[in-house]
Amino acid sequence: MKILISGACGFVGNALARYLRSAMSGCEIIGIDNFIRPGSELNRQALQEHGITIRHADLRVASDFETLPPVDFVIDAAASPGVLGGVDGKTSPRQLVEHNLGGTVNLLEYCKAHRAGFILLSTSRVYSIPPLAALPVRVENEMFAPEVSRALPPGISARGVDETFSSAAPVSLYGATKLASETLALEYGEAFDFPVWINRCGVLAGAGQFGRADQGIFSYWLHAWKAKHPLAYIGFGGAGHQVRDALHPHDLARLVVKQLEFRGRNMRIVNAAGGAANSISLRRLSTWCEARWGKQPVDSRPEGRPFDLPWLVLDSARAMQAWGWKPEFSLEAILEEIAAHAESHPGWLERCAS
C-alpha cells in the first residue's frame, strides 16, 4: 500500500508515518510538509532514515500536487492548529481557512484524481462551545467533573462528549474549518466513490511534541515545569481545575491501521481520545510535576478567555463499537514519556518556539 501523509514532519504526522512504516508490511509512505512550523525540520532526517520519502509541498498551492505520484490512501495530519487560530494576532482568519479548509480541498481533489481513500484527523473543537462552557461541574479531587445529578446536554455523560453532541456555531474559527473539512470530505467520498474516515481527536500527547499551551498542553506544561518557565492557571477561578484527556499518537495510529486495511462500509466519524481514564486537571498535572522535579510557583489568573472550557473529555465508545479500538497507553505512561524527553532535551520549548 502507498500512503501520502500531509504534515508529515509535525508531531502527529511524524508519529503516524513511523508507526505505519513499521506496522504495515510493504507499506510505502510519502510525507509532505511546508516546514512552516518551527521544529518540523527536526523530524525530516529521522523520517528519511526510516525509509520514508519527504517532499516539500504547501497544501494551499494546488500546483504542488501536480508532481506527486498516485497513492492508495491520503492521511491529512496537517493543520494550522489551536483554538485561538485566526483571532490571536499570529494567524489571520483568511490564513487559517486557506490552511485548514483550502488545504483539505486540494487533498480531496488529489484523492478524486487518483481514487485514493482519505483519512481526516479532525478535532474535539468541532463541538459547540456554549453548552460546554455552561456545563454544570463540581470539583472532585482537584478536578472538574460533570454534575451528573443535574440535566446534562444531549451527547454528554461522565464518560465524555460523544459524536451526537451539538456542533452548532460557535465552535471557534479553527473548529469551523475542521467541521467544514469533515463535511466536504464526506461529500467528496460519496460523489466520487472513495472511502473517507474522520477521527475527531482529543489532545494528542507524547515525547517530541512541539509543546504550546493552546494545542500541546501536556507536553508544554511538563517541559515548562522542568525548565522553570512561568506557568499560570487561567480562568475558572485560577485554581487549575479544568480538565482534558490525553491520547498517545501510537494509539491513534492503531486506529488508522484498521481504517487503512478495512474494505467495506463502517461508521465514518468517530472520536479518538484518551477518555475519562486518561483525563487530568492542570492542578493535578502540577502535583505530578512537583513529585518529579520539585515545587514551583504557578500564577493564578481568575479571568477567563474566549473558547476556554472547564471540562472537555471525549467518549470514544463508537470507535470501540465500529473498529474494536481503545487506547492502550495510560496517562501515566504518556506523562513518563514526555518527562523523559524533557530531561534529555533541555531548551526544547525554545527550539520549537513560534
Image: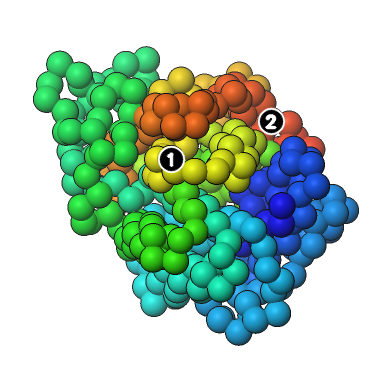
Q: Does residue 238 sit above or below 283 in this rendering?
A: below
Q: Residue furthest left?
A: 151
Residue behind mark 1:
266
Pick whichever, 100 or 40, lies toward us.
Answer: 100
Instruction: Give whichever of discs 1 and 2 has the lower sequence position.
Output: 1
Q: Which residue does the image show at 60% across and 25% down from the upper left?
A: 329
Q: Where is residue 222, by image quadrant?
A: top right
Pick whichever, 188 or 184, lies toward us.
Answer: 188
Labels 1, 2: front one: 1
Pick whichever, 146 or 9, lies toward us.
Answer: 9
Q: Residue flagged by tag 1: what amino acid is it?
A: Asn
Q: Does residue 213 sit above or below 79 in this rendering?
A: above
Pick whichever, 122 or 222, lies toward us.
Answer: 122
Q: Residue flagged by tag 2: what amino acid is it?
A: Glu
For the residue labelled by badge 1, is the local secondary structure a helix, a strand or a loop? Answer: loop
Q: Where is residue 86, by image quadrant?
A: bottom left
Residue behind mark 2:
337
